[in-house]
Image (cartoon, helix red, strand yellow):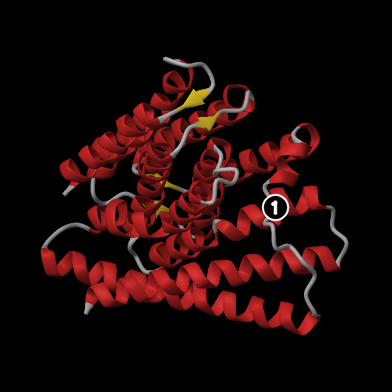
Amino acid sequence: MNFLLIVGGLILLILGGNWLLKSAVALSLKLDIPKIIIGMTVVSFATSAPELIVSINAALSGSSDLALGNVIGSNIANLGLVLGITLLLGTMNVQKSFYKIDWPVMMIASVLLFLFLNGDNIINQTEGIILFSFLVVFLIYLLRFQKTAVVDELPEDDEPLPLYKIVLFLFIGGLGLWSGSELLIKGATSLAQEFGVSERVIGVTVVSIGTSIPELAASIIAVLKKEKAISLGNLIGSNVFNILAVLGITSMITPVAVTDQGLLTDDIFWMLGISFLIFPLVFFPKKLQLGWREGLILLTGYLVFIYVTI
């Protein structure tokens, strides 16, 4: 029964996120907001909506470990699972923005998260404001200096929609996200109690893999269709948003505290480690290119993480 709740919750989250993204982009186009702005704000926030709603709902329900585990686990899954599988299916060329902007910002965000948690085992409102402010500065920088890359990240089906459809998709998307998060959290917490494991373990494994499914599906479809595969920049951007937007906004609403020390003694070091590992892999053995060997390394690392955690 708990697995059904989790699966049902994930399906609603994925559908709700898609509906919200479609309506948000259509509304922005109707209001004549430049595509550059849409790409870096509307699209980015909409695609992070499932993680954001799950984390806020979990934290408000007193399940902070689930909220933190979701974000930390998703960041590990994005680079280990999603990128690993994508590279096994095809070679990926890496843009220079990787080492100039994307990777340094991801590492700074990751280290900030570690420092905030390591001090007192909690992300308070002030620290949440700092994380979110860093995101705003990052977005402003991208809008000024990375305009071409931003436009490329817009969905292909960004056609205008009638106002009633926009409102309908917005309502259904929001309802789907909240309902999905309720089912997911209820199923995840009950599953943890049933098997005698912590919410942190469920968060960094089941929940985080579930919220990474859209990125995995998109990357596999892109490779199979021989289209432009999901870029390393997109995955790193997702990790940045998970920390700065999801945890930043969540902790501004309610403090996010660590209960299970495994998040600080194990999981966050796995996140920092796999985030750092990407840098040398991009340059060795072939500069600015990732292939199946790197994919195998990342996927193996992720499977070891899951094995050790469970």
Instruction: Assess disc 1: are there few (<14), some (14-19) or many (≥20) residues with their C-alpha within 10 Å of its C-alpha.
Output: some
Please indicate whether residue 10 sits to the left or right of residue 107 in the image: left
Q: Position of residue 106 (x, y in %)?
A: 52, 33
Please tell me which residue is depicted at 38% across the width and 38% down the height of the picture: 88
Q: Position of residue 57 (x, y in %)?
A: 43, 67
Q: Nearer the viewer, residue 90 or 56?
A: 90
Against 53, is 175 above or below? below
Residue 296 falls in image quadrant? top left
The residue indicated by pointer 1 is 154
Quadrant showing the N terminus: bottom left
Q: Position of residue 219 (x, y in %)?
A: 49, 49
Please tell me which residue is depicted at 28% across the width and 53% down the height of the picture: 205
Please tell me which residue is depicted at 71% across the width and 38% down the height of the picture: 149
Residue 193 in sight in this render: yes
Residue situated furthest right in the rendering = 32
Against 205, is 118 above or below? above
Please indicate whether residue 185 sits to the left or right of residue 125 in the image: left
Against 198, is 304 above or below? above
Residue 127 in sight in this render: no
Q: Position of residue 100 (x, y in %)?
A: 62, 22
Q: Please state which amino acid type lies under the numbered disc 1.
A: Leu
Residue 244 falls in image quadrant? top right
Q: Nearer the viewer, residue 290 or 213?
A: 290
